Image (cartoon, rainbow, N blue to C red):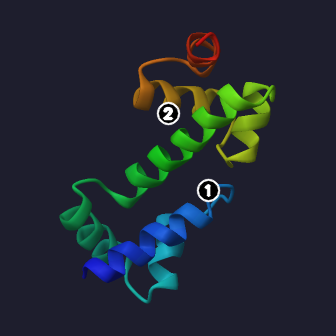
């Protein structure tokens, strides 16, 4: 099971810029979405969706402080539905809006 979850994690990491669904990932690995989510949650203590959003947020955070791309460009690059959705997810994960995060960490 651990090797399967590790493979799924790698797949998610390689597809941060794509709008893939958890059902699609389960299909790639030959599982039902329910079984995939259950196995992933048992191993990682979070759902695959939560993990994928966290990965995307971490990658977007790096872009915020290392590039001059706009928040909208970064949201689009990481296949968030829109800038509002990106900002909501980002704030839930980091406690800061993307703009506040950029201001806070670019000064250091």
**Quadrant placement of the N terminus:** bottom left
Image spot of residue 108 (x, y percent): 58, 13
Residue under numbered circle 1: 16
Residue located 41% across and 20% down the image: 95
Image spot of residue 71 (x, y percent): 72, 26
Secondary element at tag 2: helix
Residue 65 appears left or right of 73: left
Residue located 43% across and 89% down the image: 30
Identity of the residue furthest to the front in this view: 108
Residue under numbered circle 2: 89
Image spot of residue 45 (x, y percent): 21, 55
Image spot of residue 97 (x, y percent): 55, 18
Identity of the residue furthest to the bottom in this view: 30
Residue 44 appears left or right of 28: left
**Residues at marks 2 and 1, CA–CA distance in whole angstroms:** 14 Å
Secondary element at tag 1: loop
Identity of the residue furthest to the left in this view: 42
Above/below status of 6 relative to 17: below
Q: Nearer the viewer, mark 2 or mark 1?
A: 1
Label 2 crowd bin: few (<14), some (14–19), many (20+), radius 10 Å: many
Residue located 79% across and 35% down the image: 73
């Amino acid at each position: 099971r651990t090797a399967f979850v590790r493979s799924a994690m790698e797949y998610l990491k390689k597809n941060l810029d794509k709008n893939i669904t958890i059902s699609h990932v389960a299909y790639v690995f030959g599982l039902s979405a329910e079984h995939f989510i259950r196995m992933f949650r048992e191993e990682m203590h979070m759902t695959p969706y939560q993990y994928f959003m966290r990965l995307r947020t971490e990658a977007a955070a790096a872009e915020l402080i290392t590039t001059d791309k706009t928040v909208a460009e970064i949201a689009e690059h990481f296949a968030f539905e829109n800038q509002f959705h990106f900002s909501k997810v980002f704030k839930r994960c980091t406690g800061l809006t993307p703009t506040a995060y950029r201001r806070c960490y670019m000064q250091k």
